Image: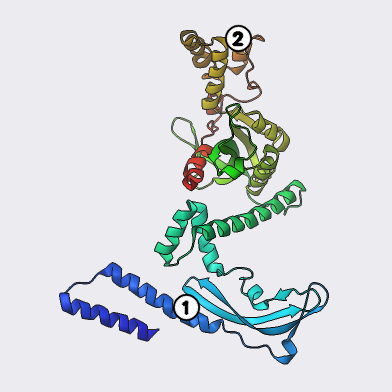
Amino acid sequence: MAREVNQLLGRVFAQRRKDGRTDLEAVESALRTALHQAGAAALNELLQFETPAADQRQLPCRCGHHAQYQEIRSKPILTIVGPVRMARPYYLCSQCHLGQFPVDVELDIENTEFSPGVRRMHALVGQQAPFDHGREQMQLLAGLEVTTKSVERIAEAIGGDIAQREQGEIQKALQLDLPVLVGSPIPILYVQMDGTGVPVVKKETAGRQGKTEGQPAHTREVKLGCVFTQTTWDKKGFALRDPDSTTYTGAIETAEEFGKRIYREALDRGWSRAKKKVVIGDGAEWIWNLVAEHFPGAIQIVDLYHARQHLWAVARQLYPQEEVQQKAWMKVHQKRLLDKGKIEKLVARCGPSTPAIPPWPRRFAPRQTTSRGMQSGCGIPHFAASTCLWARV
């Protein structure tokens, strides 16, 4: 390794003596390449395994018989320092004809030509940006040449493993098979949830009806949730979310499955220790069905923005194609009733003949929550969608 570095430095100093210039980017890139090559050479030597001793040439096979040593076989591996070729013993069962590479299992490279470190890189770049952008990042930042398809496959495989472990934790939560949660009481713990459509490839929407009748779907709904705490207020009495207290969870799944997911997240955050428990959402029926199932007894808040949206929908049904009448109706029902938290009066004013209004009376209106010192908006999941999900398209 020292020899390669000295040779490179010799060329650099020779070039400086010749023209008095030093291209730092070129030098640091060349140094990285030289060090990677030296590291790959060392790793290549480390991964040359010898023929097993006579008493190690037989291994148990899962069929119940034994696999016998056959030969040393080689395999290319892309590592963090570059490509190497390893050689390791191969065993074969004469009964079921299943081959084994024990070294591959030990080194966590079974059925793959990427080292654990490179797979971790794949997963990191694959979850942050489009897969081809991830390929470019691997080349620029690590000097590794990979394909867009390998970034996709490895990122999705690791994501699948994570999802499987999450499902196991969710099932434990539902069965109340959880460790005892010990800790200080939490003054106020919030849960927010929402859903938004994200573009997906065609195979993900096959057979799904789009929003327009007769048209195929172009998006799938991802359900997002977050949990956070609040212990302070600003000078005007508005609740302030505690810095760095927010955790997120989400998936493209049914409302029933997502309910289990957000419930587990709330449990992990100390739902059972919260003195005041609050759930914030829009007027979507699936959200409040989940609240009733998983968070009974929690304070329920419909945020102001979505409450206004629903009220405008009522106005449009009452006065279709009559914009002036719609605005006049909203001036009374939004500004004088909804915005001031007079929800019971709003519902009473509308009467039974008015198009359906979500069941807000049993939930706090946004202005009521302000006077009670609680959060009233559910924009956090929307922000998560903008910053995380849309970065992938």
Tell me which corner region of the image, top left, top right, bottom left or bottom right, holds residue 90. bottom right
Q: Which mark is residue 349?
A: 2
Instruction: Please rate how many residues cluster around mark 2, counting C-alpha atoms within 10 Å: few if below 14, some from 14 to 19, many from 20.
Output: few
Front residue of 304 and 393: 393
Left or right of 16? Residue 207 is right
**Counting residues from the N terminus, which is met first, the one under dot 2 or under dot 1?**
1
Tell me which corner region of the image, top left, top right, bottom left or bottom right, holds residue 193. top right
Mark 1 belongs to which amino acid?
A: Ala
Residue 169, x across and y down, in percent: 70, 52
Front residue of 241 and 131: 131
Residue 123, visible in the rendered structure:
no
Task: Note whether 97 is above or below 127 in the view shown.
Answer: below
Whole-angstrom CA distance, mark 2 to mark 1, is: 77 Å
Residue 224, x across and y down, in percent: 58, 41
Mark 2 belongs to which amino acid?
A: Arg
Residue 194, x across and y down, in percent: 58, 36
